Structure formats: structure tokens, C-alpha cells
Image (cartoon, rainbow, N blue to C red):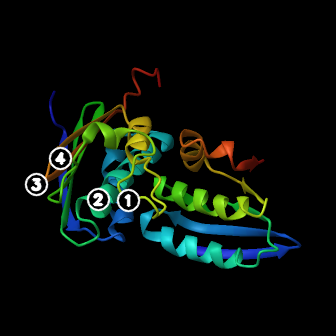
Amino acid sequence: MEIKNEMQVEFMALSQNEAFARVVVGAFATQLNPTLDELSDIKTAVSEAVTNAIVHGYENNGGQVIVSAKLYENKIEIEIKDKGKGIENVAAAREPFFTTIPGEERSGMGFTVMESFMDDVYIESALKEGTIVRLTKTIDHKAKGE
Amino acid sequence: MLIKCKSKGSAVLVQLMGELDHHSAKEVKDQLELYLRDSNVKDLILDFEQLRFMDSSGIGVLIGRYNTLKKRNGQMAVVNVNKQVDKIMTISGLYRIIKKIS
């Protein structure tokens, strides 16, 4: 499939950049002419993945988060990448209410939210190397008859 | 995040204005706990009319306050929930413990 547009941003793993990241990706995604609901879905999923990178990947100790996105004819593919500690058990991390930081009011719903809001969530992780989360969503208004 | 509180009898009504994510979660948690510090407060109603965004960090904040109130047989409710926030509330099963008032 032909890439129509591509972007990448890199920022420090600071919680104030969570809003920045979702707004940047949201603004980029508007080129596909998504509905407001689709745009909300994308922003929410990005927020979850970036928060994971900051809280879990880097354990709130700094580092860089790289967010990139590719636009295809009717699809957006977003990658959120950190070079943090990695996920020990990816299958467990996907489970609802799974959290490695109990007692801190982390809900453990991050991946569940990403999976509910996007069409596909791909996770690639290696211990001490980092994690890549790839989120895909089809924005196809012709197929929906719009 | 801007937070405003009104109190009536044993109930407090709190307006959250802004975005509830991991960045703002601690501030919201601390402020809500401050409003609930008086053990005579039994019920918490959250007005989400100007809550523009919430992700799963908000789920933890809400469950935490629910647990505080449950210990004193209190209740929690939300009003004016937008579509995005509603989706998060639904997926997480929060409506099983927090009432939505329309």
C-alpha cells in the first residue's frame, strides 16, 4: 500500500508531553478526514501508549519517546517507541486490569483501551531494549457510504 | 485542570474542567480527596460537562475515590459525560459502580 504522508516526533518522556503527543497525532490524522469520534479514538489510544512508555518503559526516569505516523489512502498507522525496560510478558500486559504498579491507582486498562479504540494493536518488546506499539485504524468513508 | 467544588449537606458536586490523563491524575486525586476529607461527606457527583478528555489514568482516579466513599456507605455519580469519556467509562465497567445521571 502506498504511503501518502509520514511524520515523526521525538520528545522527552515527561507526563506533560502526553497531551502534546495526542494533539500532534490528532492533527496529522485529520488529513484522512476522520469523524470527530474516530479522531477521539486515535487521540485516546496514543495517550495510552505514550503514558505506558513514560510510566512503564522509563519508570518516570526520563528518556526519549518517538512517535511516528504513516497515512495511507484510508488508514493510519502510528508507532510509539521507547528505549526503556521492555515488557516482560506481553500477553499478560494486554489483559484487562493487569498492572505492574499496584497501589498507585493505575487501572491496568491501557492496552484494553487501545484495542477497543483502534482496529489493530501490535506490540513488539524486548527486555532492557524497549517497546514499540503499533496502532492501526482504517478511516474509510467511501466504504461507509459517506 | 481546573476543579470547582460545591457542597450541599452530605454531598459534594465537583466540576472537572480540562483533560484527565496521567499528567493531571495526581492533582485531581489529591483535590478530590481534600473534598472528601470530612467523613460526613457521603456522596460525590462529578460534573464532566467541561471534561474534554479522559484516558485510562482517569479510571484509577475514579475507582480510588469510589473506594474512599464505599467505606462510609457513600455513592458516586457522574453527569454530562461526553462521548469519548463515556466510551472509557463503559469499556472499563465503571458504570457498574458509578451511576450516570442524565
Query: In the picture shown, does residue B73 fall above or below B36?
Result: above
Question: Along the polypeptide, which appears first: circle 2 or circle 1?
Answer: 2
Is B34 displayed left or right of B72 in the figure? left
Does dot 2 land on a helix, a strand or a loop?
helix
Is B87 displayed left or right of B68 in the figure? left
Marks 1/4 same chain: yes
What residue does disc 2 label? A56
What residue does disc 4 label? A6
Task: Indicate the chain on which mark 4 is placed.
Answer: A
What residue does disc 3 label? A129
Task: Indicate the chain on which mark 1 is placed.
Answer: A
Q: Amino acid at mark 1?
A: Ile
Q: Amino acid at mark 4?
A: Glu
* Mark 2 in CB contact with mark 1 (< 8 angstroms): yes
- The residue located at (44%, 36%) in the rendering is A116
Residue B28 at x, y percent in the picture: 56, 71
Does dot 4 land on a helix, a strand or a loop?
strand
